[in-house]
Image (cartoon, rainbow, N blue to C red):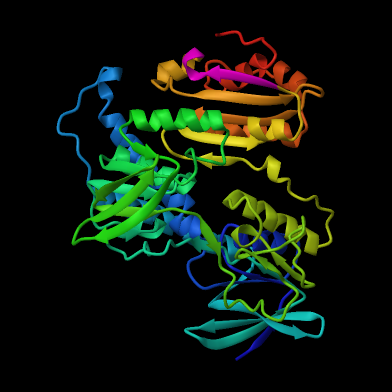
Amino acid sequence: MSTTQFDVIVIGGGPGGYVAAIRAAQLKLKVAVVEASALGGICLNWGCIPTKALLRASEINHLLHNLGEFGFAADNVRFDFDKVVKRSRAVSAQLSAGVAHLLKKHKVTVISGFGKLAGTAGANRKVSVSVDGRETTVLTAPNVIVATGARARVLPGLEPDGRLVWSYREAMVPKAMPRSLLVIGSGAIGVEFASFYRNMGAEVTIVEVAERILPVEDAEISAFARKALEKQGMKILTGAKLGKITKADNSVTIDVIAGGKTAPITVERVISAVGIVGNVENIGLEGTGIKVDRTHITVDPYCRTGEKGVFAIGDIAAPPWLAHKASHEGVMVAELIAGREVHPISPMNIPGCTYCRPQVASVGLTEEKAKAAGYKIRVGRFPFIGNGKAIAMGEPEGMVKTIFDDATGELLGAHMVGAEVTEMIQGYVIARTGELTDGELKETVFPHPTISETMHEAVLAAYDGALHI
């Protein structure tokens, strides 16, 4: 065994951990990253990136089957499902290798193994690294960033078995395309998988315990998305609970209780997408001042834990559990350690995106939460059907909704559903971060023809000034 001294040790090489390491190295700190699996974490290897590759394939499949609208015809349209899956894995492998290159470029030491807090040595924290349960080295540093991420929550009786019941991992690498699916949970992960498999031809049913799908989104956007998905042939059951589960050789039957009635649903495969659990086990939290709340480490606005010199970022810490939030926390903590002046990240300025068809994106308060907070509000709405570019693209299904404080003109929230809204939401994020008001947004010139013009119109609509509806 060897002991190596660093300025910063990062436990976990996901989008929070590796970005924190790179930024710390840029600030002339000596940095080590301990990673037990592939660099890039769940996001790059089993989440954000490979799912987008799969969704892109499903969008192409949808388009190929709807060419008539554009004056084209194609015979015998088909896909090779194995190649679709292999391409998504190749995309992840390429980017994971890219992360390794970036860390090497910035002279970050990467150590393969399972890292855990192991007490102190004077002013330093100790981190033990083990492989296959055997300690291989001990690292020391005055600062440790815990970025161990999270994993899928498992429902009793619906444990992933790699065959009939899938988590996100199995859903990304199936051996064959299922003909029917039951997706349990309608957050971003559940809806994205439902969208992928429906657009590839599977019969899909979504079951959600809440009264509406995408429950963290604005209710109006949620209702719009539901209608769009049902129009594509999905079956959606909300306010629903699961009853008896029966597994057969190549199918699963689940009793679904909704609206006071119980009905059995039989499908080939089940995807469980009911949230995440923080990876807090076996990382040395015992005997420290670090507190855990419902499997997530409690942190202050600067991601500091209750233990001096130990920070926690990303999915192991506070919500929202999003890769871009983790990365920004990593930068903030690295700069804090380096003695830079930093500002806490406002959760209300972090965008949320769901890459189904149509896409959903939002930032800030929903209408319901704005009212509950006591604001007198102005609400603007603009539909894609009033936008020339959306119609020309064959994407007239969508809307943009803005919520302003009537007293100050502050943009309290923005909510979007439709083609490419995950690319456009950043405009509203910049507006909130820069504390722009309705006045600046009204005077902003948007290029024509673009779908982004709907964003301008939704601002104007809040003040009864929309031009194209």
Q: Say if the magenta span includes residue 346.
A: no
Q: Where is residue 364 in the image (x, y as percent from the top left)?
A: 67, 36
Q: Which residue lies furthest to the left in this view?
A: 76
Which quadrant of the figure has residue 71? top left
| Outermost residue, front side | 260
In the figure, residue 336 lies in which quadrant?
Answer: bottom right
Query: Which secondary structure dominates the residues rendered in magenta?
Result: strand
Q: Does the magenta-highlighted stretch encompass residue 381?
A: yes
437 vs 61, left or right, is right
Residue 80 at x, y percent in the picture:
22, 47
Q: Nearer the viewer, residue 348 or 367?
A: 367
Residue placed most toward the observer, 195 or 7: 195
Side (left or right) of 350 relative to 158: right
- Point out the stretch of residues depicted in magenta: 378-386
Residue at x 74%, y 55% (from the top left corner): 332
Residue ID at (31%, 37%): 199
Q: In this view, does 40 lie above or below 255?
A: below
Which one is in front, 327 or 348?
348
At 62% from the left and 35% from the top, the residue drawn is: 426
Image quadrant in which the C terminus is located: top right
Q: Viewed as shown, does residue 449 lie left or right of 248?
A: right
